[in-house]
Image (spheres, rainbow, N blue to C red):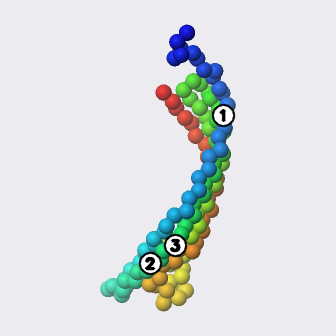
Amino acid sequence: MRRDSVRRPFTRRWWGLFDKAGVYHNDVQGGIYEFAPGPIGSFTGADTTTSFLGEIKLTAGYQLTKRVALRAGYQLIWLEEVALASDAAVRSLQNPSLLNTASADAGLFYHGATIGLDFGW
């Protein structure tokens, strides 16, 4: 019997756990440009830091047909030591002397459910 003629068993259910992590050099540059009836000023700042990114995703699937699968899961993404535009705006409104600074000291955490339909050929 030829090797390519052997049929594999059809698996209807599957699951997977995926993870990623990384430490990155983060070179932050930003600016705020103020305008009234005419330009008031341009303020720019820079910062350098080490940032972290982590991701975990758990996915389960069900093979509806040989070519179509339904999948669902949950995903978590964590970012640390990043710059956010909203933080820069709030900081500059609270203290105008901070207009020419950039700070990468914020963190973000995203999570949520995922669902998808896969078509294969």
Name the residue furthest left: 38
Kind of residue sitting beneath label 2:
Ala
Task: Identify the image quadrant of the N terminus.
Answer: top right
Mark yes or no: residue 34 visible.
no
Of 44 and 26, nearer the camera is 26
Residue at the image position 48 percent from the left and 90 percent from the top: 97
Residue wearing tag 3: 49
> Could you tell me residue 68's position as x and y percent?
56, 29
Residue 76 rendering spot, x and y as whole percentages: 63, 55
Q: Residue at x 61, y 42 (%)?
A: 115
Task: Give the mark, 1 or 2, whose residue is nearer the N terminus.
Answer: 1
Q: Do the residues labelled 1 and 2 touch (CB within 8 Å)?
A: no
Label 3 close to label 1 by CB (< 8 Å): no
| Quarter-of-image position of residue 100 | bottom left
Compared with 90, 25 (above or below) is above
Checking the image for residue 46, the label placed there is 2
Instruction: Count neighbours of disc 3 (C-alpha within 10 A) and say few if under 14, some if 14 to 19, many if 20 or more.
Output: some
* Disc 1: which residue: 14
Q: Distance between the residues labelled 3 and 1?
A: 40 Å
Amino acid type, residue under disc 3 in the picture: Thr
